[in-house]
Image (spheres, rainbow, N blue to C red):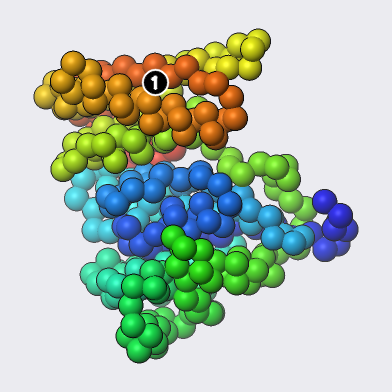
Amino acid sequence: MNETAEQMRAGFVALIGAPNAGKSTLLNQMVGSKVAIVTHKVQTTRTRLRGIAIEGASQLVFVDTPGIFKPKRRLDRAMVQAAWGGAQDADLVVLLIDAQRGIDEDVARILEGLKEGGRPAVLALNKIDLIRREELLALADDLNKRFAFSDTFMISAERGDGVADLRAYLAEKMPPGPWLYPEDQIADAPMRSLAAEVTREKLFLRLHEELPYSLTVETETWNEFKNGSVRIEQVIFVQREAHKKIVIGKQGNSLKKIGELARKDLEEMLERRVHLFLFVKVRERWGDDPERYAQMGLDYPKE
């Protein structure tokens, strides 16, 4: 770090949007490393996960929030609360919109929320490679008529197009001040939590239908050995015995495959040998257990 203290900037950027807008993909692009779950399923991000990026003399702390949608369950309400809380606490807000989907019910609700909150926001239209230019420009115009965005960016989070320009813009807008984290740190979640998220991602990718929304993963033990390797034990909590059978699979094949995929990612992330042990337990109505919400970093919403 060669920049002088006078030049240094640091601040928080909240990434908000509807489910599956591409927030986690954008976060990983911004940070240059995988710190967030990315799947084809909606609502995979449950907590406010912070990824840290350096741009020149600025340190950007990105808050990847859960997708904002119309909540139906207690867990849904906690996720939406976390998303708006992340927006309120940040120095800058980036609203990410899937250009293909345009202005749907969820986006309209978010725009109303931004108006009510009175916070300035930057618009980032994502997946621009999948839509015609005329439609894209019309969408940008429509959105800016509905809300006075401070600036508009056209990006492809998956391909990385336009991401560098957006990062440079955000870096200039950060408030002056010392960096908030060490230069080489890319996330502020404990490694135990990140490890649990890696396994949860594999469960989402491997399993289908509604089951993934009814499970959570917790890292119970983390033992490091003198040879540099680490033994990690995790519990996958499901709500029914039938769900447990699906996760384990015939002759344990499904759980074995999930463990292999998670271990591979963890070894890449930790740059060391990982011994991963997965257990599946039934905990009925874990979605109504305040302790589980605390484990996920969510406030437990009252009825």
Quadrant of the image for the C terminus?
A: top left
**Residue drawn at 27 percent across, 50 percent down:** 41
* Quarter residue 244 falls in: top left
* Quarter residue 142 falls in: bottom left
**Residue drawn at 50 percent across, 15 percent down:** 231
Is residue 9 shown above or below 192? below
Return the x and y of residue 127 as percentages of the image width and height: 38, 69
Amino acid type at image mark 1: Gln
Mark count: 1
Asked if residue 85 shows in the view, the reply is no
**Residue at the farthest left position:** 242
Front residue (pair 185, 133):
133
* Quarter residue 156 falls in: bottom left
Secondary element type, mark 1: strand
Return the x and y of residue 265 as percentages of the image width and height: 46, 34
Return the x and y of residue 262 as percentages of the image width and height: 40, 30
Asked if residue 42 shows in the view, the reply is yes
The residue carrying pointer 1 sits among few (fewer than 14), some (14 to 19) or many (20 or more) residues within 10 Å by Cα, namely many
Is residue 261 shown above or below 19? above
Front residue (pair 177, 40):
40
Return the x and y of residue 260 as percentages of the image width and height: 38, 26
**Residue drawn at 54 percent across, 35 percent down:** 269
Is residue 107 shown above or below 67? below
Tell whether 48 sits left or right of 41.
right
Residue receiving disc 1: 234
Front residue (pair 207, 149):
207
**Residue drawn at 16 percent across, 27 percent down:** 246
Front residue (pair 154, 253):
253
